[in-house]
Image (cartoon, helix red, strand yellow):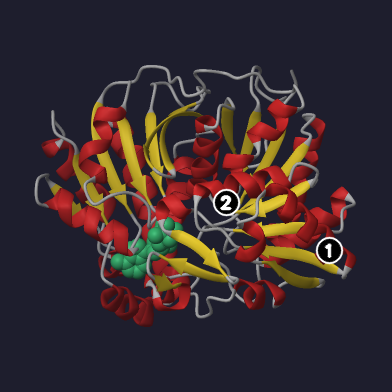
């Protein structure tokens, strides 16, 4: 069987989140880091190419996404999926809109959907407005995001600023009627000249119905949620077997560590919970900016503290602290300094025998995975919604088996860093 679904994710944890969703829905899935050069892996139903394009200039994000699309087309994929964050992270310049526009043009299609809903994680869309838990997007912690602060919850408005064609809405009164009604609404919007439909969704049933309504769309765009409904489309066409186990991971061992570079609300709580029970090392951006050798200090500390219990290295700070640091260093410099330091610490930890590693933060995970020379991840069992355990595909750069959990900032329960280990095979 050839690969069925080809996905392009705009960051690493987003890619893992989507891949985990596909595995849960019974598709054997591999996540590849960056645009690959070789042939696709065998015995795989879906491939997720994870880029690091969320906050790149739009032209670069578009070029990378198109390169990923070409590779996925050559791998024989029948449908394509552009994955972004369930909090619709983007600036007014993009990149969600420009990338979707470019992929549509390359695929010769004039209509797609945009649906970041992920009800299991509290991301719901109603009347086109995105809610994070009980709050509108622009009233949630996302208004303070270090790189992509979100100031408007109307997805129709946010996307309209980023794309050339018209953006319409398939609202809840349609979605609650099920797949046929949703597909009919898509057809209607398309006839009216809309290129995009924002789609309301407040439950997994809605996501299943939306997925079914997307069976004939060459391109789907969204968070990971709508992936839930896509595998059944392939089953209905006899293209996908009802695999019972799609989440098998090779065994790993070694020491355990957590690296947190996310300042999101959920990560702050998770860091606090772990600090209460584990040894922890704080990475301070101002010390990095002064040129202090924080990486060496962290690794000396780790060498002394790594044992039976997991350890924590974190840069996580409150919004006030982050703002103060950014005012001094600039947003980009602060982010890069921390990402580079945490990536170097990850390399050192693996050298010190860490074989099971949790990384918190999308950008942070991207930097860590790159530094470790990892080219792909086999997707395993889920820890919390949106965060599976994975195992690094072995290559020249990786000599020891390594289990990785790449956690998007706002995902996971408060005790995530503590409970995750028990889910490993
Ligand atoms: P999330 O998934 O929560 O968005 P990311 O890792 O994608 O997390 O983004 C967080 C950004 O904030 C990264 O660029 C990281 O380097 C930066 N950062 C982390 N800690 C601090 C800090 N204390 N001060 C300033 N920036 C920080």
Q: Which mark is residue 188?
A: 1
Left or right: where 4 falls relative to 73: left
Residue in view at x 86 percent, y 58 percent: 110
Above or below: residue 327 compared with residue 407: below
- Structural crowding at the residue carrying mark 2, measured as other residues with C-alpha within 10 Å and reported as few (<14), some (14–19) or many (≥20): many
Q: Quadrant of the N terminus?
A: top right
Left or right: where 318 falls relative to 208: left
Alpha carbon separation for disc pair 1 and 2? 19 Å
Question: Picture coordinates of residue 412 (x, y %)?
Answer: 33, 49
Left or right: where 206 falls relative to 257: right
Q: Is 40 in front, or is 28? A: 28
Which residue corresponds to mark 2?
206
Q: Is 229 in front, or is 157? A: 229
Q: Tell me which corner region of the image, top left, top right, bottom left or bottom right, holds residue 380.
A: top left
Above or below: residue 375 compared with residue 301: above
Secondary structure of the residue carrying numbered label 2: helix
Q: Earlier in the sequence, mark 1 or mark 2?
A: 1
Question: Picture coordinates of residue 35 (x, y %)?
Answer: 67, 40
Above or below: residue 326 compared with residue 24: below
Question: Picture coordinates of residue 165 (x, y %)?
Answer: 82, 71
Residue in view at x 30 percent, y 29 percent: 423
Q: Tell me which corner region of the image, top left, top right, bottom left or bottom right, holds residue 355.
A: top left
Question: Picture coordinates of residue 360 (x, y %)?
Answer: 35, 50
Residue 135 is at least partly visible in this image = yes
Residue 376 is at least partly visible in this image = no
């Amino acid at each position: 069987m050839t690969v069925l679904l080809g996905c392009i994710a705009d960051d690493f944890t987003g890619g893992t989140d989507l891949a985990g969703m596909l595995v849960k829905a019974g598709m054997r899935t591999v996540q590849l880091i960056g645009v690959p050069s070789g042939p696709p892996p065998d015995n795989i139903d879906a491939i997720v190419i994870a880029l690091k394009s969320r906050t790149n200039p739009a032209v670069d994000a578009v070029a990378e996404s198109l390169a990923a699309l070409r590779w996925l087309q050559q791998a024989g994929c029948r449908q394509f999926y552009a994955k972004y964050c369930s909090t619709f992270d983007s600036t007014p310049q993009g990149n969600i809109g420009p990338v979707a526009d470019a992929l549509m043009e390359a695929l010769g299609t004039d209509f797609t959907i945009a649906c970041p809903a992920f009800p299991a994680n509290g991301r719901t869309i109603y009347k086109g407005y995105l809610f994070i838990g009980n709050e509108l997007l622009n009233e949630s912690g996302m208004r303070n995001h270090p790189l992509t602060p979100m100031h408007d919850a109307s997805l129709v408005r946010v996307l309209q600023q980023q794309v050339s064609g018209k953006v319409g809405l398939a609202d809840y009164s349609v979605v609650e009627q099920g797949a046929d009604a949703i597909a009919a609404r898509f057809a209607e919007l398309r006839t009216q000249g809309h290129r995009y439909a924002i789609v309301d969704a407040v439950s997994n049933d809605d996501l299943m119905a939306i997925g079914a309504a997307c069976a004939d769309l060459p391109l789907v765009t969204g968070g990971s949620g709508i992936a839930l409904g896509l595998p059944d489309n392939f089953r209905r066409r006899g293209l996908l077997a009802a695999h019972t186990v799609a989440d098998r991971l090779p065994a790993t061992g070694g020491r355990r560590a957590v690296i947190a570079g996310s300042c999101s609300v959920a990560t702050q709580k998770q860091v606090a919970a772990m600090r209460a029970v584990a040894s922890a090392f704080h990475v301070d951006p101002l010390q990095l900016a002064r040129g202090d050798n924080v990486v060496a200090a962290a690794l000396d500390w780790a060498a002394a503290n790594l044992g039976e219990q997991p350890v924590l290295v974190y840069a996580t700070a409150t919004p006030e602290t982050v703002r103060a640091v950014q005012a001094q260093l600039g947003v980009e410099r602060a982010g890069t300094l921390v990402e580079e330091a945490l990536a170097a610490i990850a390399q050192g930890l693996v050298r010190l025998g860490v074989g099971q590693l949790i990384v918190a933060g999308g950008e942070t995970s991207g930097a860590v995975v790159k530094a470790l020379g990892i080219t792909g991840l086999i997707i395993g069992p889920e820890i919390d919604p949106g965060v599976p355990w994975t195992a690094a595909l072995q290559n020249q750069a990786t000599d020891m088996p390594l289990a990785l959990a790449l956690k998007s900032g706002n995902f996971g329960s408060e005790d995530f860093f503590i409970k995750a280990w028990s889910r490993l095979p």
